Image: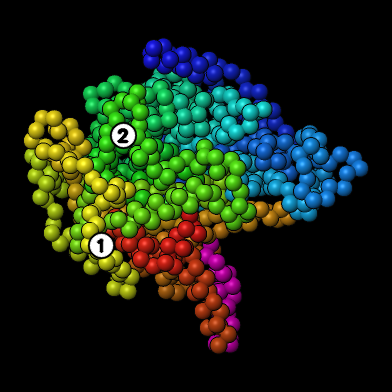
Amino acid sequence: MRLIVIAGLLSLTISASCQASSSSSNNNPGQVVLTPPSNQQDDGPSQFVKPKRRPLTGRFLHITDIHPDPHYKSGATFDSGCHRRNKKKKGQKGKGKVQSDEYDNMDDEDNDEDKHEIMKDKQKNGVDLAGEWGTAVSKCDTPMSLVNITFDWLKKEWRDEIDFIVWTGDNARHDIDRSLPRTTNEIFKLNRMVVSKMIDAFGTDIPIVPSIGNNDIWPHNVMAAGPSKLTEEFLHIWGKFIPPDFAHVFERGSYYSVEVIPDTLAVISLNTLFWYDSNTLVDGCGDHSNDPGALEMDWLDVQLSAFRDRGMQVWLTGHVPPHMGYYYDNCYLRYGDLALRYQDTIVGHLFGHMNIDHFFFIDVDELENTPVTRSKSKVRSKKNFSPLTANLTSLPSFQSQRLGDIGIFGAADTLKEELKKDFQDMPGPKDLKLKDYVVVNVAASVIPTYLPGLRIFTYNISGLGDEKNEDAFYRPHNSPTYGEDGNDDYEDEQEGIDHESEYDDDDEIEIEKKKDRKPGHRHRGKRPKKGDCKKPENEDKPHCVFRRQSRHYSRNSPSRSNKALSPLGYTQFYLPKLNKQNSKPEWEIEYTTYKKGVLFPPNDNSTENTHWKQPLPIPLRFLPGYDDLEINEKENNEILKQKKKDEWEKMLSKITPWKMPDLTIPNYVKLSRKLVKEKGMWDKFQELM
């Protein structure tokens, strides 16, 4: 019976891929007709373009969840998914809250005067309607006006300022309007459109690494192994970005890797849909399985081993974040195993999907205590679901609860509480083993679920460039491997203390250890006995598997200490004035992870950051008030000059709440402790989320 069901779903997916799109363009400002780029052929994959070698900037872009909607109309109702406008019938004055039956549908040819009248009516009568540039804190997708100003800004400001792009999926609208259902053809067209905008903004001179999202397929979430119409079409759409050596791999599974700095740094684009437990066409990642999720894990293991043997570092990227609340249990365990086993090779983990800016930890204690459901046919325990990974767009609160322009959804409140508990439950500095932790970053999205956001990361490029200094590099294949033959006693006894001593004295915060608290997080309460690993019935249990697995760990790897290729920080940009209808919103800094002294050189003539010996994290023109500061330097009144400088320092303090020296694991651990120790910091963390 199960095979029949799967075959039926496969047939449905294949037939859907052959549908013609019923979507039509409209005359709204900023909207476009969805046509493939003129240089793209229909008879095969677009030609891979090998990026040119350029001087490194030490920066890259992470952008995710664009969700363009060509049917979006400003002035439309939220109940219609922002697709249909309403207007009053003749003779009605419309006092008080307007009822839906007082309006007739407006067509696409309505002029600007009609739209402005509708927006005035909204302000007078309290009717929530879609804004011209999108509406923050709403269930609607991204209007083309917002897509266009985003890529125009990226092209103008960042075309020559970054080294590569991590692009983690969802380039089609949600299926939230039953009267205007998505089609496979529309999804492909939207993805082609975003590709054309990427190429227009950045050309083909830098690597662009896209990943497939759960809304880039029809039906959403559901994807079988290829080759298929779906994988072939995305190979066609992303052909310029996927190295030819991975064409067959991509046709089978839609995952691949790109050397963004040849022989030095790679980005692996993962297809997280094969691990996503909402995907009913797969069955997890069981050992010795031919299921697509298991085969992708096997492939990832081989890739990481090969990059390690070559002495390279790797970013792991994908759409759905790795957590038991999203992944099949055995997929979550295998991802955690690889993340920890190759922690001297993996420099970081970047994901999207959730639309909420945050980070969380994967740790050994959590993995060892994960109850494994071996088959999806068995009912998963609800206790394994965590609000940390709840898909907010599918929750009832997302559909119905709107608390105003600065409001939040109930699910977000739950996420904040769960993260706070997780950070509180972490062991103190003397008990925590840094080798047991990895950090996962989930970025803000372009879609205005809250406010549109994207990130510019920096990484250490010391020793890179034309005069490459081999001595500056950490070589993972030269480091020892720990934990072989069941030996679990390989921790430097003073590791936690030594790492903490590397922090600035004025930044150190240590949480008082609770008397009865056991190490670990997200697994509070009574724990089951793990069982003796020497007994055959326990050998496949997570705690025994992790105990006997060899693990590549070094305190000198780029994910653990600041050296060449280490992530140094990121700056998050956002659109704070999205809901103001009379002015075009502009991208600006929401916050950075850096210390403020790192953002600004000691003197105006300096072009290099003296702390890192590399370019500044972000060009100075983006710093709030920098133009006024330059004018102020010409001021003859020293008192006034100092006053203006003090005001500028305060502005910098507002965008530098975390003051992290870098984004290595020790500093993330320290940040998590500070967040739950200082109430003011936790409040700021919630605000920025």
- Pair 1/2: label in front: 1
- Residue at (56% x, 28% y) in the render: 187
Q: Residue at x 29, y 30 (%)?
A: 373
Residue on which disc 2 sits: 329
Residue type (three-letter) at the residue carrying disc 2: Asp
x and y percent of residue 287 in the render?
23, 27
Q: What number is the disc on residue 514?
A: 1
Q: Which residues are magenta?
A: 622-638
Q: How is the image coloured?
A: rainbow
Residue pictured at 59% horizontal, 46% vertical: 401
Q: Residue furthest right?
A: 91
553 or 240: nearer the viewer: 553
Please state the horizontal and vertical placement of residue 255, each as a whole percent of the image.
Answer: 38, 31
Dot 1: element: loop
Task: Using the image, determine if residue 605 lies above or below residue 358.
Answer: below
| Magenta-colored stretch includes residue 332 | no
